Amino acid sequence: MNRSLRQARFDDGGALDEAGRDRAPAAAGSLPPAARVVVSPGVRCRETAGALGLQGAEAAELAGLDVGRRGGRTLDEVAVAEPEAMGRWLTDPSCAPHGGESVRDACVRVGRRLDALRETDGRARLVPPMDAPGTGVGF
């Protein structure tokens, strides 16, 4: 958890908040072993991995959705400033009116990385972001 997620903001690359830093170590003991760990390059993902006691390779393909000029803004702020563009973005996964990437493109990017993990012997653990507020799309 970080400020962006807590406040329904488009991710601004911020660190874990206090609650996030407190919760992650508690989950560490409940994770089954993994043959491979892959971490998103995002700050909060690297911090989460560290708090879980996980060390792994960073994978640029697991980066959060590039939300362009919307980074750090709330859903409400964007809906008021750009109602038509926000409506298109929420209903068309191939749309990227914010100058970043579309949800569809992000899903393809992440999917390629997941497909590559099929080559892994044993369980793989991923520490990806969840940062597409209001969409139900998590990475």
Image: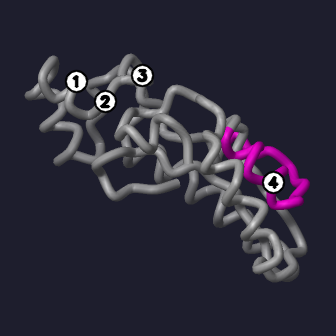
Q: Mark 1 points at which residue?
A: 77
Which residue type does callout 1 highlight? Glu
**Tag shown at residue 68:** 3
SS at mark 2 in the image: loop
Q: Which residue lies furthest to the left in this view?
A: 84
Whole-percent x, y for residue 29 in the image:
82, 76
Q: Earlier in the sequence, mark 4 or mark 3?
A: 4
Q: How far apart are marks 4 and 3 (CA)?
A: 29 Å
- Asked which quadrant contains residue 14, the reply is top right
Q: Which of 20 and 32 is in front in this view?
A: 20
- Asked which quadrant contains residue 77, the reply is top left
Instruction: Judge the density around disc 3: few (<14), some (14-19), many (≥20) Cα neighbours within 10 Å.
Output: some
Q: Which of the two marks, 3 or 2, is nearer to us in this view? A: 2
Asked if 95 appears above or below 99 in the picture, the reply is below
Q: Earlier in the sequence, mark 2 or mark 4?
A: 4
Q: Do the residues labelled 2 and 1 touch (CB within 8 Å)?
A: yes
